[in-house]
Amino acid sequence: MDREDLTPAAGSPAKPSGSFGRLSSGFLAVSLLSGAALVPHYDPAAALSSLESIASGIPLGAFLRGLHAWSSYGLLLALVVHAVEVARKRTEGQLAAGVWWRAVALLPLLVLALLGGFVLRGDAEARAAADVWRGMTSSIPGAGPPLAALLLGGPGSGLGAAALHHAGTFSILLVILTVEHARVVWPGTRPSVLAALASVGAAGLLTVPLGPPPPGHGVLLGPWPLLGLQGMLVDLPAAAGWIVPLAGVLLLGSLRGAAGPARTAALAALAALAAGWAAFTLRILVLAGH
Amino acid sequence: MYRTPAFVTALLFAVAALFAVTARESARVRQTGSGPSRAGGAVERCVSCHVRPDEDPGGAHSRAALGCASCHLGNPLAFDKERAHAGMEPEPGALSTVASTCGRTGCHPREAERVASSLMARGSGIIGVDRFAFGEIPVPETADTMARLISRDRPSPAEDHLRKLCAGCHLGTRRNGRDDAIRGNGSGCAACHVARRTEGEKRPHPPVDSRIGDDRCFGCHSRSGRIALTYQGLFEVEPDQRRTSGTETAGALEDGRPVCRASADVHLASGLGCVDCHLHTDLMGDGTRPAHKEQQVEITCEACHGPAGPDGEAAWREGTDPVTRDLLRTRKESRPEDERVRLGRRGTPVWNLRPSPGGKGWVLLRKSDGKPVAVKPTPRDRNHGLKGHERLSCSACHAAWAPLCTTCHTALDPAGKQWDFSASAETAGRWTEKSEGFGAGRPALGVRGDGAIVPAIPGMLMSVLPAGGGERTVRLYAPIEPHSTGSRARSCASCHSREAARSIAGELPWEGTRTGFRPLSAGEIRKVSSVAENPAFRAECRSDRLDSRPPTP
């Protein structure tokens, strides 16, 4: 397919780069709706207790929580595969530069939203993850400490700020940026139904962890998409926690307009980053005794 | 991607999931308790299910005040049993988790820290003496602890001996790691603060408090120096000895050891238990790391009976011991700041000793029920001011008897198997102890490093056959407070005759189980003996006030 064929006329919907863009929109819809259903039952001031109530105290609460969690993880997976589709089909040129960079920002935004959701658990692993998140953010020169306070509130201030950004800021931005680059609001019935069925299946058959980690596990694990980062931070300074992901985002963004050896180099660097991420994930799992 | 097979697969996946959700939902409804979900102002869902009255320890640790998870850990927010019980501590107070249970912030962190450094947790005294007896160290002193000893990969013979015969009483050994008579006690804090559980017994949640009954001390202290037995007027015998000794038999202990009856300690007759005399620092320590028990024990006879030394008494306002203040507060008691209080050797107030209402003398309040017991002051008579008796401890004269094991033979049978407290299982090698019979009689007297003369018993007179080594025979005497106090002291003649003077020195020669502890020297024996030939002796000796009966039993 020629690049020209994939470039839509101005104002018309983007031509799909594959199936996973629309599927990720479907997962986003399921995640937002299930998240909205959880909101009345969640209390940031008694995070763990209210989640336990949701998980076991209200009818279908565990299922609803699972639906939210697994649809969000599905969204991340679909988004990553969508990015690979775009890179493979070289369809990034469909978007204006600004729109492309904002679309690329969907990936870190989603990771922040997922990290926020993990922190909202309020259990030992969540508290540890919040401390790591705060430490990484604070290590950004100049803007670090105020940015950490913006995202997580002041030290000891509870989970109010994290809850606000998780359910509000990040979710709204995800919707806006998704609609902006896809140029459609409704991804279609089939992607939405498929995302819903997959989320229902995962929520029914798999449980989402909560509460104290199993006895004998010396290392508290963060959210699984960020285990590579956790493995990396065992030896590297906290600043690596934002420098490495930023490098990945910049490499992905630089694909637009890159051609020939520059594009190949950027893709190779992204592949190396992904391999390193996987290796560090394995490392932290071994350290944790899994 | 969006073709029919993908949808059919996803649909099957979702239908299977819905079945799982339905089953999970039924289980959730079944498992959700019907009781309250809060305890002590906090969310605590344990009490939703654990609602029976017999699951409540009551008192300051009541379920309504603390819930369950404060002591038992687990996940108090979870609704379902499996998740609620994940990470639960079945033995609250165990030293391995005490920082999260009894010793958590806001509860008893100070006490938990002290216990960790106390002898009952460290066991340094018994380790030092045992390794000394086995010839592994030149002096009976060590900084080693039982916790380190039981985690060692390649134990020495003495360490193996300790792991198999002694480590069960170590406060760090969990209940399920034991196979002996003290199995019923918990470990750590629970060893003393929770009532014993008999094998197979179903019982309500025991109370958890500071009113410690003697039965909790008995499990450990009926061994070795056997002071808990002696205090109750019991002495251990061999099975065949009971039939032939002619003494009154008292049946057998819970662990099967036969015992005979002797005179009980006079304090028992007054209704006093172990903790009525012993201070919290004697039992839980004071944060220091004593090498032997006499360094940890702070209470003295003089603290109650007087005369108090220059640092032996103070006004309450001068007291700084925070644990004593906590104890009074938890018992809802207070003391006027200008009230006098007697002090232990390191300055800890004997808080249950109060000036008698008339202002003359003192009364000791029983810790179990607060009942006052009048304390007899040490008489200011000639018997207590005799020249030459300045170095004698109170028990040198007032200990009526002590257990004497003079024929103990310890050997290792490499082919046998024995419970190993470090492994919580039987391991190769069995230590056997054989004697030709236990004895009970007047203890010998020995001289401590500071010159004081105290009772001594041949606790470690034995032949040791270490693994692979030749026989090693040692004759060791241990200083002891036998806990067989009589109101009457031993008679003058029980020491001051040629035969008696030789006999009170014990079976010479012997080595002491403490640095500097030694037998009476030949000169000292001669001096004691020569008193009998002094014409003034009979006039000086007020034998009507002394116990001239033969040693009991």
Image: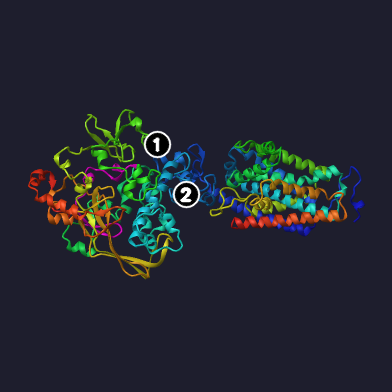
Q: Residue B527 location, x and y as percent?
A: 16, 51
Compared across the picture, whether B496 is left or right of B512 comes to left
Q: Which residue is mark 2?
A: B97
Could you tell me which quadrant the N terminus of chain B lies in? Answer: bottom right
Chain ID, mark 1: B
Q: Nearer the viewer, residue A3 or B334?
A: B334
Q: Is B254 colored magenta in this rendering?
A: yes
| Residue B233 seen anywhere in this rendered image of the structure | yes
* Left or right of B142, for residue B526: left
Q: State the image quarter where residue B309 is shown.
A: top left
User: Residue A272 is drawn in which quadrant?
Assistant: bottom right
Q: Which residues are magenta?
A: B250-279
Mark 2 belongs to chain: B
**Disc 2 versus disc 1: distance between alpha carbons?**
24 Å
Q: Disc 1 residue type? A: Pro
Residue corresponding to mark 1: B322
Q: Amino acid at mark 2?
A: Thr
User: Residue B495: x and y, percent?
Assistant: 15, 51
Residue B183 can be seen in this image? no
